[in-house]
Image (cartoon, rainbow, N blue to C red):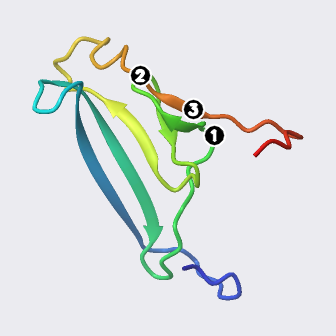
Amino acid sequence: MADPDRSCPHLTFEARVEVNRITTAEDGPVVAYSADIRVRCRDCDEPFRWTGLEAGLSQARPMVSVDETELRAPLRPASADPDFGLGLPGFAVVYREGDSRG
């Protein structure tokens, strides 16, 4: 875990990329792909957070994990139609300021 009292110039990075094949049924045909990407400083092990994206999962647009350390990005082969993978269900985490539920 990162130490807030230890300054690190973050000069060396490591990225972990997992490419997922998405099917609608067990052993079914691949209907979409996505990449899960995490980046951390190799020197101090501090994870980096993705900014400007909603938390959730969607085949229509990139989203992030709730802690913002994983980018979940839909992708398709260059030869696939532009609508490849669209129409699959997803979810979004919505934060409402002042909401005291939960």
Q: Local crowd at mark 2 within 10 Å, few (<14), some, or many (≥20)? A: few
> Residue at the location (31% across, 30% down)?
75
Label at residue 89:
2
In the image, taking residue 24 as reference, residue 60 lies left or right, namely right
> Residue at the location (56% across, 50% down)?
50
> Residue at the location (58% across, 49% down)?
66
Q: Secondary structure at mark 2?
A: loop
The correct choice, above or below, for 85 with respect to 74 in the image is: above
Residue in the foreground of this view, choosing between 16 and 25: 25
Residue in the foreground of this view, choosing between 18 and 22: 22
Q: Amino acid at mark 1?
A: Gly
Residue in the foreground of this view, choosing between 25 and 7: 25
Q: Residue furthest bottom?
A: 6
Q: Earlier in the sequence, mark 1 or mark 2?
A: 1
Q: Secondary structure at mark 1?
A: loop
Q: Local crowd at mark 1 within 10 Å, few (<14), some, or many (≥20)? A: few
The quarter in which the N terminus is drawn is bottom right
Q: CA–CA distance between discs 3 and 2?
A: 11 Å
In front of the other: label 1 or label 2? 2
Q: Amino acid at mark 3?
A: Ala
Displayed quadrant of residue 100: top right
Give the residue number, with chain letter if any, for mark 1.
Answer: 52
Q: Position of residue 57 (x, y in %)?
A: 46, 34
Give the residue number, with chain letter if any, for mark 3.
Answer: 92
Q: CA–CA distance between discs 3 and 1?
A: 14 Å
Q: Amino acid at mark 2?
A: Pro
Displayed quadrant of residue 92: top right
